[in-house]
Image: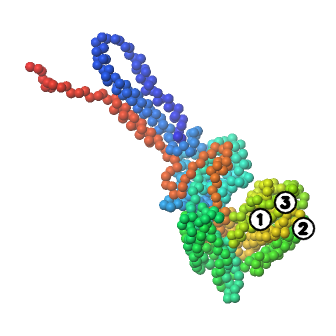
């Protein structure tokens, strides 16, 4: 049991006070044998057993009354997960609030979403525990915000749902910086989340440094995880996977591709009971005009490819929305898109090795469709300053990592949403980019294959038809080591990364552990994987160059000013400065922007219990699982129960102390005398 005022428990030895008084009273009398009393003692022997039991009961209830009073004034709490053993009030309480789309899931019976329930529980709990002041770090901007009181969490805009994913390690980093900068005293960190792996990044390299940083702090820091891990089986998520405009004989049409996924389902598993066939109405809205189609979904996923939607020939640029009927999570029941004539795809290849540069130029210059214009140029490493960055869709870099001047230009290019793919140089040096550098080449005795890769997302994901890329058929004769904090997307035999992604606020930065040169790998000979990787990067980069742009919900990329955007369609949520956090269609000058939720939000797995415990290994950590819609409080003061127990004990003790009623005298007349 936990107590808010455990210092009063030091009075618990007072429970023995009735015993002490009893022993003192016994020493006040001396036993004197008197012959006449011997007959009375003999007469009372039959009732001595009951008298002793009654005396022990009186003693026990007196002790129970004292114990109940002491426990009541110590303010006990129901549920020991808080572990308030120290009993001192925290100086600072930091709330880390995950408000990603998956936190908008609710359960049958209502009661609110996971996010609403979590906020309500925290607002109820924190005033009970007490604190000097409160701080909110929300999962969209990772910016600490002071709160006047815990009740402010229910109304602050920083606690409302958004379409952006959360970054729990970045939120903890912000909390650590605040604690260190303000030199707080005893601090409690509350994390409210549904434990989705895309938000927690449990395999990332930031957790070890975070643990060490908190362990080195002089002040006490305790972590409480308020978890909502329960999925919603049967919840459907819809996503637009592609849209392009093409002319026809009678006008024009949009070719729309989309996917629908079912919560709790895995690829390849047979459909469960009731899931063998399911009719799903899909509503498509284009510039306000709506149409509907019904599809039959079998199994865990459904893919619709190149569905034709006729439009006017003059309808060149516009926006659209795809939606399905409401279910457990309204945040993934729609997706937004914009369309326009495709912007030209122009790739720049910086290569020191002609054998590696030629396959890259060839893969970048072949367009994937007749309506797409693609080109590529090769630039020497010393000519980077002359690149026209505003026309570049993808940068392919096969040379020593850029010097500070070139790195600054690439950083600005990434900030605008550009895409960069680095290949190792012939002679790796000490150069690095954002803390990542090449180490040394390794040549195994025999060619290596790719043992695992991310087929669910990013540039090695499955094709629109659902088939995997032939990544496993690649042969790697030589590969270069990579050092720094990156996320592996493909891994070779032995664990070396074939492809890794660097964490960026916008744009994409990737590292490939080998080159397409014939002496290094079969990427050129078996060119499907190389071609798809480069074209996917070029497509993503070209979207930034046209008059339409699709953004993943999150902090606005460099050069964008959400406060100046005008909302065209979508729910009117949040402040105008937070427009990039909410899905919908916006007008930014002459450009049209579609903000969508992150792809990782769809069916992201939950972090396993043992893995979560490992992330907080060595730290003062506790966890409680809750469910969406729970109206009960996480903790309750139970002192009233002990106060009632004390009063009941006193009443029973008083009843036991009352003398037994004497039986009425038998025979004769009351008040009379014998004649």
Q: Image check: 280 left or right of 170?
A: left
Residue drawn at x 84%, y 68% as measured from the top left: 524
For label 3, the crowd category at 10 Å Cα-Cα, with few meaning under 14, some 14 to 19 and many 20 or more, is: some
Q: Quadrant of the C terminus?
A: top left
Which quadrant of the figure has residue 237?
bottom right
Query: In the rendered image, which residue does mark 2 sit on?
Result: 355
Query: In the rendered image, which residue does mark 1 sit on?
Result: 471
Circles 3 and 2: CB distance less than 8 Å? no
- Residue 548 seen in the current view: yes
Q: Which tag, 1 or 3, sits closer to the chain's start?
A: 3
* Viewer-closest of 357 and 562: 357
Q: Image check: 283 left or right of 398?
A: left
For label 2, the crowd category at 10 Å Cα-Cα, with few meaning under 14, some 14 to 19 and many 20 or more, is: some
Counting from the top left corner in percent of width and height, residue 84 is at 57, 41
Give the Cα distance between marks 3 and 2.
Answer: 19 Å
* Viewer-closest of 345 and 263: 263
For label 1, the crowd category at 10 Å Cα-Cα, with few meaning under 14, some 14 to 19 and many 20 or more, is: many
SS of the residue under disc 1: helix
Q: Which tag, 1 or 2, sits closer to the chain's start?
A: 2
Give the Cα distance between marks 1 and 2.
Answer: 21 Å
SS of the residue under disc 3: loop
407 to 27, vertically: above or below: below
Q: Which mark is residue 300?
A: none
Which quadrant of the figure has residue 464?
bottom right
249 to 321, vertically: above or below: below
Counting from the top left corner in percent of width and height, residue 208 is at 72, 48
Q: Which tag, 3 or 2, sits closer to the chain's start?
A: 2
């Amino acid at each position: 049991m936990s107590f808010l005022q455990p210092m009063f428990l030091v009075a618990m030895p007072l429970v023995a006070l009735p015993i002490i008084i009893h022993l003192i009273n016994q020493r006040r009398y001396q036993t004197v044998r008197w012959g006449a009393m011997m007959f009375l003692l003999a007469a009372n022997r039959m009732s001595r057993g009951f008298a002793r039991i009654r005396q022990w009961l009186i003693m026990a209830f007196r002790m129970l009354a004292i114990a109940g009073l002491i426990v009541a004034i110590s303010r006990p709490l129901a549920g020991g997960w808080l572990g308030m053993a120290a009993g001192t009030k925290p100086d600072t309480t930091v709330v880390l609030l995950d408000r990603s789309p998956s936190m908008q899931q609710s359960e049958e019976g209502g009661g609110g979403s996971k996010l609403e329930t979590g906020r309500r529980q925290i607002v109820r709990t924190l005033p009970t525990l007490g604190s000097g002041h409160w701080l909110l770090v929300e999962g969209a901007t990772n910016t600490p915000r002071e709160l006047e009181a815990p009740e402010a969490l229910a109304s602050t805009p920083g606690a409302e749902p958004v379409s952006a994913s959360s970054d729990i390690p970045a939120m903890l980093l912000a909390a650590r910086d605040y604690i260190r900068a303000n030199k707080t005293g005893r601090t409690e960190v509350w994390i409210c989340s549904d434990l989705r792996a895309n938000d927690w990044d449990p395999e990332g390299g930031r957790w070890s440094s975070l643990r060490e940083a908190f362990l080195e702090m002089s002040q006490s820091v305790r972590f409480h995880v308020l978890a909502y891990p329960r999925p919603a089986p049967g919840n459907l998520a819809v996503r637009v996977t592609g849209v392009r405009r093409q002319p026809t004989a009678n006008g024009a049409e949009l070719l729309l591709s989309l996917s629908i996924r079912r919560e709790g389902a895995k690829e390849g598993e047979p459909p469960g009971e009731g899931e063998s066939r399911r009719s799903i109405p899909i509503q498509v809205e284009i510039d306000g005009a709506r149409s509907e189609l019904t599809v039959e979904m079998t199994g865990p996923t459904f893919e619709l490819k190149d569905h034709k939607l006729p439009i006017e020939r003059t309808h060149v640029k516009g926006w659209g929305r795809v939606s399905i009927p409401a279910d457990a999570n309204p945040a993934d029941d729609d997706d937004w898109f914009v369309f326009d004539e495709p912007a030209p795809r122009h790739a720049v290849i910086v290569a020191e090795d002609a054998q590696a540069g030629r396959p890259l130029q060839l893969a970048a210059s072949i367009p994937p469709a007749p309506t797409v214009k693609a080109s590529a140029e090769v630039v020497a490493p010393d000519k980077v300053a002359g690149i026209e960055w505003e026309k570049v869709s993808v940068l392919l870099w096969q040379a020593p990592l850029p010097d500070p001047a070139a790195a600054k230009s690439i950083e600005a290019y990434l900030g605008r949403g550009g895409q960069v793919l680095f290949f190792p140089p012939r002679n790796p040096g000490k150069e690095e980019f954002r803390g990542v550098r090449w180490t040394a080449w390794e040549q195994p005795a025999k060619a290596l294959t790719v043992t695992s890769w991310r087929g669910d997302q990013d540039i090695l994901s499955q094709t629109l038809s659902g088939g995997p890329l032939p990544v496993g058929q690649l042969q790697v004769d030589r590969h270069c080591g990579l050092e720094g904090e990156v996320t592996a997307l493909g891994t070779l035999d032995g664990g070396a990364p074939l492809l890794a992604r660097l964490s960026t606020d916008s744009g994409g930065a990737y590292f490939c552990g080998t080159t397409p040169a014939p002496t290094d790998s079969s990427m050129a000979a078996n060119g499907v994987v190389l071609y798809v990787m480069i074209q996917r990067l070029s497509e993503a980069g070209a979207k930034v160059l046209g008059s339409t742009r699709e953004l993943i919900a999150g902090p606005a990329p460099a050069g964008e000013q959400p406060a100046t955007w005008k909302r065209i369609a979508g729910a009117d949520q949040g402040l105008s400065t937070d427009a990039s956090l909410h899905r919908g269609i916006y007008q930014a000058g002459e450009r049209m922007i579609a903000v969508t939720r992150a792809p990782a939000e769809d069916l992201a797995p939950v972090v396993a219990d043992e893995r979560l415990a490992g992330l907080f290994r060595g730290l003062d950590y506790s966890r409680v699982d809750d469910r969406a819609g729970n109206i009960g409080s996480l903790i309750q003061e139970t002192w009233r129960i002990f106060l009632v127990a004390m009063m009941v004990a006193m009443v029973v003790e008083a009843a036991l102390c009352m003398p037994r009623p004497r039986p009425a005298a038998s025979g004769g007349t009351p008040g009379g005398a014998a004649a």
